[in-house]
Image (cartoon, rainbow, N blue to C red):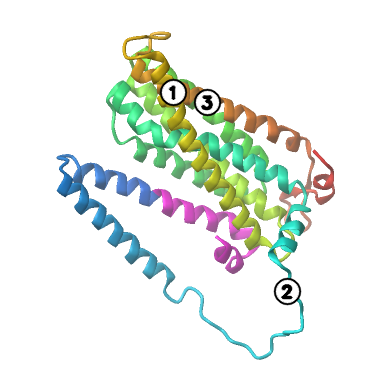
Amino acid sequence: LALATDLTPKRLQPRVVGLMYVMLLAGITASAWVFGATLENLTPGQLVRVLQGAAVAVIMLNLIASWKQEALAVSNDMDTATPVATFRESWRQLCRGPQTVRRLIIVGLGSMAFGTAKVLLEPMGGHVIATAKLLALLAFGGLLGIAYASRVLSRGTDPFRLAFGGAAIGLPGCLLVIGAHSLGIPGVFLVGTFLIGFGGALFCHATLRAIMESAPKGQTGLALGAWGAVQVMAAGVGVALSSAVRDLANLLLGPDRQVFGFVAEAGGYVAVSALEMGLLVATIVVIAPLLRRGLVPRAGDGSQTFSETSLQSGP
């Protein structure tokens, strides 16, 4: 992401970042179908062979992607007398940017919320409504979300409004996932899964764009690194937390108890969906103050962007 940002004109950055995520989600979608087909008759030996094939594919694709991506250029004209800022100094400078800490908190809450869903959607579908290929559907929703986000962000749309919309779209998705079992309609679960994928992609792309815009000059790479670190750690916490909540709910319900028409097996997944909804609401609450900031026309191109002065004020 940092390299693509350095090589791309500012007006094209949303499209380039969107393309990178489209390729990521395309890989997830394609591999989900390939794994589903190759593991249809599951045996330990077949599972090992599929894992080995995936590992070889990852190594080969990364070697191809890295080949001559950044040529080594040694120059004798570099000013070695210029002091280089330490990581601590650079980090402090980044955090002094407009609303940087709040932006990272938003990234953490939203990533944790959507992270709770991704691991449990597939097993929940299998246990509750016996559907499959949910990961591919989730990625397909993400593809459409990234395409839409890239389009509107390249036109100067407020990234926080888009992130707000992504979190809001995730809420009905969770409701549909929860209600699918009691309604007895598998299609409802599929629609909820699609909405979670679509909303998560909008949120991801929009917050990335917001972090890039807020980065001080020369610190875009550090800002992207901070966004990536917060996103990955928060998503990991969401995955671990959702697993613990599911197991605890199943333990409390017991093997035979039903709550609101849900069997014990489904009750744990419903608790996870409720947790995700709570995190999405918290994300919306944290984003809301930033939506009050005004937008001003960007000089020269007729589009809109954040006014720097409006973002300097506190939350």
The residues bearing labels 3 and 1 have C-alpha atoms spaced at a distance of: 13 Å
Secondary structure of the residue carrying numbered label 3? helix
| Residue denoted by label 2 | 84
Q: Amino acid at mark 1?
A: Leu
Q: Is residue 269 left or right of residue 114?
A: left
The quarter of the picture where residue 86 lies is bottom right
Q: Tell me the magenta residue range.
A: 1-25
Observer able to see residue 231:
yes
The label nearer to you, 2 versus 1, is 1
- Crowding at mark 2 (Cα within 10 Å: few <14, some 14-19, many 20+): few
- Crowding at mark 1 (Cα within 10 Å: few <14, some 14-19, many 20+): some
x and y percentages locating residue 125 in the rendered image: 33, 27
The residues bearing labels 2 and 3 have C-alpha atoms spaced at a distance of: 44 Å
The residues bearing labels 2 and 1 have C-alpha atoms spaced at a distance of: 50 Å
Label whose residue precedes the other's in the sequence (3 or 1): 1
Which residue corresponds to the image point at 53% horizontal and 58% vertical from the top-left? Answer: 16
Q: Amino acid at mark 2?
A: Val
96 in magenta: no
The numbered disc on residue 275 is 3
Nearest the eye: 7 or 39: 39
Nearest the eye: 200 or 103: 103
2 to 243, vertically: above or below? below
x and y percentages locating residue 6 in the rendered image: 61, 67
Q: Amino acid at mark 3?
A: Leu
Which residue corresponds to the image point at 53% horizontal and 43% vertical from the top-left? Answer: 148
| Residue denoted by label 1 | 248
Tag 2 near tag 1, CB within 8 Å: no
Observer able to see residue 195:
no
Label whose residue precedes the other's in the sequence (2 or 1): 2
2 in magenta: yes
Which residue corresponds to the image point at 37% horizontal and 37% vertical from the top-left? Answer: 137
